[in-house]
Image (cartoon, helix red, strand yellow):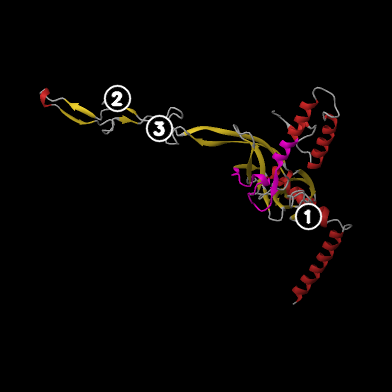
Amino acid sequence: MEINDPYRELGLTAEATDTEVKAAWRRLSARWHPDRNASPHAVHRIQRINRALDEIRSARGRFDHDHGASTPDGDAADEEPLDHSISLTLEEAARGCVRDVQGEIPRTCEACSASGVAPEPVPCEHCGGAGQVRQNLWFPWLSTSAQCGACGGEGATRVPCSTCDGSGQAAPRRYKCRIRIPAGVRDGHVLHARVRVQGDEGKQALNVRVSLVPHEFFVLQEDGAVKVEVPVDGFAWVAGRWIDVPTPYGAQQMRLQRGALTYRIRNQGFPVGPKGPRADCLVTVVPLFPREVTARQEAWLDKLVASNTGDASTEAGIRAQAWAGTMAEWLGRSRDC
């Protein structure tokens, strides 16, 4: 019985929690159990419901914090697990996601014991299996026998195995499953699942090792904080304007503060652990000013200076004029010395 999407079978999406999965299974089981439902399709329906629950449980497996590789089920302790590696972006690891995992298990050819040659030799074509060939000389009565160079005197030769065409390898067995990646998985963590392998009746343990792809501007810290450096317009920084800041969960608006270079956006970092709270996103802004000011910008700056310190009604203007008076007095005393 094949089920393409076990979540849809239970009327759920892949983001459903374990509690929601169990509740959906109980509800559907109560509805379609043959003892309660007289429909001729009840038996088939309840089988699909139970199969869907089994596949979801197997795919989700168990999260391992200690980078271990123990099997999720006690009855599979003696089983050699399969190893698989997947790469995730920092956003996928922070939010959690669902990934299709598939691979192949190489097998050696049993017919030739992985040697690539047929187990039984065949008679040598050059000597007819005798191991010796006659050397014809000028006089027939002087001809002699010599060892066959094609088979080395053995009378038989080895040919490539017909089963594997001389490769020593049989057709690989394939496996495929859908696994739920919990939010907060880190680089090097191992997820455990059960997977059905082609040609096997049961399921086999699968260890899925996670690696995080280096991000173009996010840097993940050990405590879950995510650092990001954002270049901003220097005049916007002075003016305290709003800007868009990237986080693992999308862009967030942040107001610049004149003189401040570091900021903290709460709960927009990496989850501390599975189902745990999020750390913060630490933002460092880099104000960008022009290296050379144009004539137009010079005019604007002159107007800005005049509006700031030239207006006696503002605090900056009052302090500037007081300072100018103090400087004049000091200069007058300096000339008299």
User: Which residues are the magenta region?
Assistant: 53-82
Q: Which label is found at residue 125?
A: 2
At mark 2, the secondary structure is: loop
Q: Which residue is disc 1 drawn over?
A: 258
Marked residue nearer the N-terminal end (3 or 1): 3
Q: Nearer the viewer, residue 240 or 136?
A: 136
Mark 1 to mark 2 CA distance (whole Å): 92 Å
Query: In the rendered structure, which amino acid carries the disc numbered 3?
Result: Pro
Q: Amino acid at mark 1?
A: Arg
Instruction: For marks 3 and 1, give the CA distance.
Output: 82 Å
Q: Is residue 53 above or below residue 67?
A: above
Give the number of the mark in front: 1 or 2: 2
Q: Which mark is residue 14?
A: none
* Quarter placement of the C terminus: bottom right
Query: For mark 3, what is the residue?
Result: 119
Contact? badges 2 and 3 (CB < 8 Å): no
- Look at label 2 and name its amino acid: Glu
Q: Is residue 231 above or below residue 166?
A: below
User: Looking at the image, which is closer to me, 73 or 22?
Assistant: 73
